[in-house]
Image (spheres, rainbow, N blue to C red):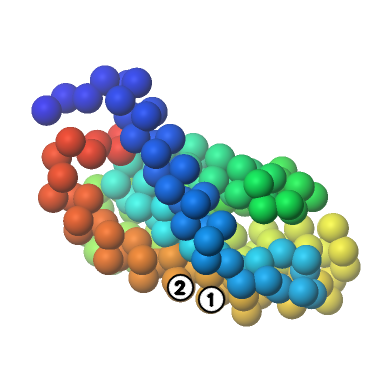
């Protein structure tokens, strides 16, 4: 079954909406950075590994930006757009339609980009100790997202009507 571009975009929009809802409901505040740990990586990883770099970029950037806006952290919006967008782009570029080892490497690199990105963003918004304080929470966030993604990816692969490539 071949899907049109508008169907792909609609599917990505649903993933973004689900990602934001899931991340908004399940969030753990991090007082040092005035931010929070959530499950946003799950949707980014799913979109990137099943849809490629462009899908990862779109879901990553839009999920990060909209989540911060809706959760009351507008100071993080642009950072999240860039950080999560780059994360999704890299995971999709490296891991899309690859075997488990390149996918694992892609997830590790994407997670590293996210962790380092938020260290820098925390340092810019607040100070270096705040940026460094975000490391443990962001590693936990990446691991939680990875676990959720690895559970859901086989489910999505069995659904031919869900084609995430844009």
Kindly identify which residue carries mark 1.
140
The reply, left or right, for residue 70 in relation to residue 63 is right
Where does the image place residue 92, in percent across and percent down from the top left? 39, 47
Query: Residue 44 location in percent, x, y?
Result: 44, 51
| Front position in the image: 136 or 97 | 136
Quarter containing the C terminus:
top left
Q: Nearer the viewer, residue 131 or 68?
A: 68
Instruction: Determine the image quadrant of residue 138.
Output: bottom right
- The residues bearing labels 2 and 1 have C-alpha atoms spaced at a distance of 5 Å
Q: Secondary structure at mark 2?
A: helix
What residue lies at 15% left-to-right and 45% top-to-bottom?
Answer: 159
Depicted 104 relative to depicted 54: above or below: below
Decide: marks 2, 1 in contact (CB < 8 A)? yes
Q: Is residue 163 above or below residue 25?
A: above
Is any part of residue 34 visible from this angle? Answer: yes
Could you say which is closer to the camera, residue 57 or residue 36? 36
Q: Residue at x 67, y 59 (%)?
A: 117
Quadrant holding the N terminus: top left
Residue 143: which numbered mark, if any? 2
Residue drawn at x 36%, y 66% is: 148
Q: Residue 6 at what x, y percent from top left?
A: 34, 21
Residue 132 can be seen in this image:
no
x and y percentages locating residue 64 in the rendered image: 59, 48
Q: Residue at x 16, y 25 (%)?
A: 2
The 10 Å Cα crowd at callout 2, few under 14, some 14 to 19, many 20 or more, is: some
Q: Quadrant of residue 122?
A: bottom right
Q: Nearer the viewer, residue 21 or 113?
A: 21
Query: Is 89 on the left or on the right of 80, as rendered?
Result: left
- Does 24 sit left or right of 134 as displayed? left
Q: Is residue 90 above or below residue 51?
A: below
């Amino acid at each position: 079954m071949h899907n049109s571009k508008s169907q792909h975009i609609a599917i990505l929009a649903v993933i973004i909406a689900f990602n934001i809802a899931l991340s908004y409901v399940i969030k753990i505040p991090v007082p040092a950075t005035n931010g929070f740990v959530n499950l946003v990586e799950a949707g980014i990883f799913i979109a990137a590994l099943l849809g490629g770099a462009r899908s990862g970029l779109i879901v990553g950037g839009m999920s990060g930006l909209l989540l911060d806006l809706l959760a009351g952290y507008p100071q993080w919006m642009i950072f999240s757009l860039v950080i999560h967008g780059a994360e999704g782009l890299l995971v999709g570029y490296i891991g899309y339609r690859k075997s488990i080892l390149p996918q694992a490497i892609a997830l590790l690199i994407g997670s590293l980009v996210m962790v380092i990105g938020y260290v820098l963003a925390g340092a810019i918004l607040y100070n270096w100790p705040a940026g460094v304080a975000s490391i443990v929470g962001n590693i936990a966030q990446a691991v939680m997202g990875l676990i959720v993604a690895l559970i859901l990816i086989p489910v999505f692969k069995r659904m031919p009507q869900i084609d995430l490539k844009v």
